[in-house]
Amino acid sequence: MLFLFMSQLDLSSGNRKTLFVEVVLPLAIAKTYTYRVPQELNDKVQIGVRVIVQFGRNKIYSGIVRTITTEAPQQYEAKYILDVADQTPILHERQLELWDWIAEYYMCYVGDVMQAALPAALKMASETKIVASDDPNLDRSAVSDKGYMILEALDIAGELSVNDVIKILGQKTVFPLLRSLFEHGYILISEEIKERYKPKTKAYLRLASEFNDADGRRELLDSLNRAPKQQDAIIAFIQLLKTKNDISRQDVMEASGCGAGAITGLIDKGVLTVEEKVVSRFEGTDILLSPDFTFSEAQQTAYDKIKLEFKEKDVNLLHGVTASGKTQLYIRLIEETLAQGKTALYLLPEIALTAQITERLKLHFGDKLGVYHSKFNDNERAEVWHKVNNSEFKVVVGARSSVFLPFHNLGLIIVDEEHENSYKQYDPAPRYHARDTAIYLAHQHQAKVLLGSATPSVESYYNAKAGKYGLIELLERYGEAKMPEIQIIDITAASRKEEMFSYFSADLLREIDEAVKRKEQVILFQNRRGHTPFLQCGTCGYVAKCINCDVSLTFHKSSNLMHCHYCGFSEELVQTCPACGLPNMQSKGFGTERVEEELELQLPNLRIGRLDLDSTKGKYGFDKVISAFDNQEYDVLIGTQMITKGLDFGNVTLIGIINADSMINFPDFRAYERAFSLFSQVSGRAGRRQTPGKVIIQTNTPNHRILEQVTNHNYLDMFMTEVTERKNYQYPPFYRLIKLDVKHTDQDLVNHAAKNLASLLRQQLGARVLGPEPPLVARVRNNYIQTITLKIERQQISIVKVKELIKQALLHFELDKKNKGVRVQIDVDPY
C-alpha cells in the first residue's frame, strides 16, 4: 500500500504546510471535490482513509481520500474537512484505480462505484440510521459520557440518524465516537441483525460412562431382560461401536429393528445420552468433502493443461461438463496459490451456491476462508472487509460484489459458472459485469483467472477459440457418473391423446412416482415465480395490471395478493372484472406456486419444497431450503433458475422441465444461448453419483434445434450456430453494445427527448445508432422509457473515442432546457 508521507514543517519558510485532499463522495456527481485539511489533522490524512466532510448546505458524508496535495483548487474556495475517521486506510490505491476503470468503462460516476463497493457501515452519512445492539451481555459502564448519552437516546427513540446524534451532542465531529461504539458492539449501523446463522447440528447417542467396560455392559443387558426391545437396541449399539464413533438414533433403529420409543426409554433411564454435534450439511454426499481427494485421469490431464496454459496466458477457460469435478480442480489451485503466500477469490453467481461451496472449502482452508455477499447485514460485511484488508482471510468466496474487497497480493481468481447473467449488475449504477471486472482486477495484481462453466458464454468461448484465453476441456463426469438421459415430451401431442394432467404429462408423473418410491429425489423447473402470471377477464379481456408499470400483476398464493415484480406494488385479488363488472376473472399461465399446488393434487403423498425468491427471504433462506432438500426432508424441489446454478444433490435422479417454450421464445439475441445453458445446467443436477439420471423436457416445439442440441449434449454445435448468426446480424462477440434508456414521467417529453438524443448521436456515429424505441416493458415506476442502442465494431474503431463522443452528445443534450428532468441511463455491454 502506498502512503503519502509529508513533512509537517516547510523548512524553507518555517511554517506548517497547508494540505488539500481530493475526496470521493458516495454520490452520482461528475467530479471529485477538494477539501482543505486543518493543520492539526495533517498527520492523520492518508490516501484511502475516510474523512468527514460537509457537502451542500447541511449534508455530512464520509468520503475517501483519493490524492493529497499542497495546491489549492483554482475555481472555488476549499472547505475544511471536519475529521478523519480511520487510523489506517480502509482501501488502497489499486482499489481506487479499479474504481476509476469501472467508472470509465461502464460510463458512470466514481461516486456510483463507491456506493456499490463499500459496505453501508463504512460510508456513513448524516441520514445514516443507527440502532442499539440487542446483546444483553454488553457492559455500558466502560462507555464514555457522550457515548452513554447516545445509547440512552437510542433506548428512548429506538433509532437515530447521524444528524440526530450531531444535534444531541452539539458537535459535528461525531463519527469517531460512532465508529468506537460500532467497533465495540454497542450500536448497529443501517440494518439491525434480524436473523443469526445457526450451524447444522446432529444428535448422536453416547453410552453412559458406567457401561464402558465389559462387566458394566453385561449387567446392563441383564437388567433389560424385561425390556427386550431396549435390550436389542443396546446390543445393536455396542455392535455399531466397533465400526463407527458417531451413532444416530436412525442407525440404532435400522440395526436393531426397534422403534423410537425404545431409544427414548434408554435415554430416560440414563443408559444413553444425547450429544449435539455440529456437522457438515453435505456430509457423506459428495466426493469433494474428502480433504485428501485424488484426481481422476481426466481431471489430472485438465489440471496439467491449466498449469501449462497459465505460463502463457493470464486468463483461461475451463469447459467442464456438469459433475466433472471442476470444484476439485479449483481447490487444488487455491491450495497452491496460498502456498505461494498469495490470496484467492472464488466468485459464484448466486448467493444460494455459497452455502454448499463454503462447507466444502472450510475443510481445506478453515479460518482462512471468508464469505461475502449482499445477504449479510452491513455490520458483518464491514467485518469481512476489515479482515480481508488485514490479510486475515486468505480465500474469499462470494457473489459479484466481492471484486470490490481490499485484496492484498491476489494470486488467483476463479469465476465459477462464468456464463451466468447474475454476474451482471443491472440496477443501480455501476452496471458492471463481475467476470470482466475480475479480469481487470487480476491484471492489477498480476494474478491468474480461471473461468469455469459447463456451458461457457459465447463471448468467452469465442475468446478462447481465438487464442485470447487458454482453453481446457473436461468432457467426462467424475467417477462412474454418466450424462443423464434426456426425453422430450410433446405437450400438444400429449394433450391430443389426453395424456396431460394439469401441467404434467403422464410420463412425468409416472417417473416422479417411481423415483420417490425408490427413495430418490426429483427437481422440477419452472422459470416463473408466484402462482398465476396474470388474471384476465374471460368476457371482455381485461388484464389486471400494475398502476405504476406496464406489466401484469402476478398472483402469489402465499400472500394472497397480486404483486408487481418491477416496483413491488401489490393489491387484493380481483374477483370481479373492474371493466365489465362480471365475475369471470380467469388465471392465465402458471408459476412455481401453482406447480406446487397442482402436483400436490396429482400426487398427494409427496413432500414438496420450493426454491424461488419468495421462499428464500432472509439471510439464510437459500441455505435452509437447500439443506432441507439435501437432508432428504423433501421428495420434490420445485424451483426457478436458482436450482440450475451449480447445486450438487447426490440423491437427485430425475429432472422435469415443465415448459421449455417460454425460455426459447424470449425476445433477446441471447435467448437460444441462455435456453441451451439453462436446460443443460438443470439437466446436470441429475445422476451426479452412480445412479443414472433422467431429464424430461415438456414443450410444444419438440423439434427445435436448441432442444436437439441439449438432448445430444452438443455445446459446440450450439456455439457454431450462434456465432454464425451473430456475425451476420452484428451482435457480440463481433460488435459491442451500448444501451441508453431515456426516462421521464411525461410520455410525450420522453419521446421527443429520445429522438433529439438519437439525432445528436447519429451526427457522429451514423448508422451505428438504432432507435429510439420502447423496450419490452415501456413504463416502470411511472417512468416512460425509450431505448437507444449503439452497435460498435470491435475492429478498426476506438471504443474510448466512441464513449467520448457519447459524453459530448449527452452534454449537449443536458444543456438543452427542453430536456430538463429527463434522465439518461447508460448500460455498457447490456447482456
Image: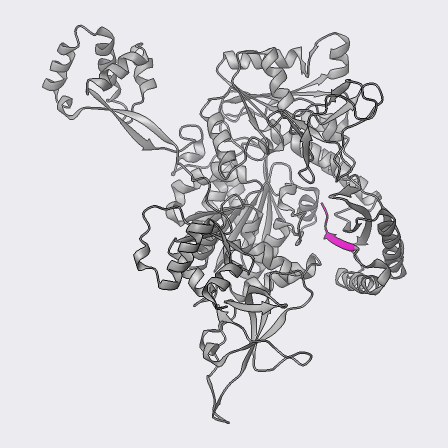
The image quarter in which residue 563 lies:
top right
Give the residue displayed 39% in from the left and 63% down from the top.
146
The reply, left or right, for residue 85 in relation to residue 216 is right
95 w.r.t. 581: above or below: below
Q: Main secondary structure of the magenta part?
A: strand
Give the residue displayed 15% in from the left and 26% down from the top.
209
The reply, left or right, for residue 737 in relation to residue 222 is right
The reply, left or right, for residue 110 in relation to residue 250 is right
Residue 442, given in percent of the width and then of the height, sits at 56, 56
The reply, left or right, for residue 66 in relation to residue 583 is left
Give the residue displayed 50% in from the left and 63% down from the top.
167
Residue 185, given in percent of the width and then of the height, sits at 39, 53
- Give, as a single range, the part of the protein colored magenta: 823-831
Residue 712 visible within the image:
no
Residue furthest to the front in view is 156
Which sits in the foreground, 377 or 384?
377
Is 830 included in the stretch rendered in magenta? yes
Is 710 included in the stretch rendered in magenta? no
Residue 393, given in percent of the width and then of the height, sits at 42, 52
Which sits in the foreground, 39 or 764?
39
Residue 572, given in percent of the width and then of the height, sits at 68, 28
399 w.r.t. 229: above or below: below
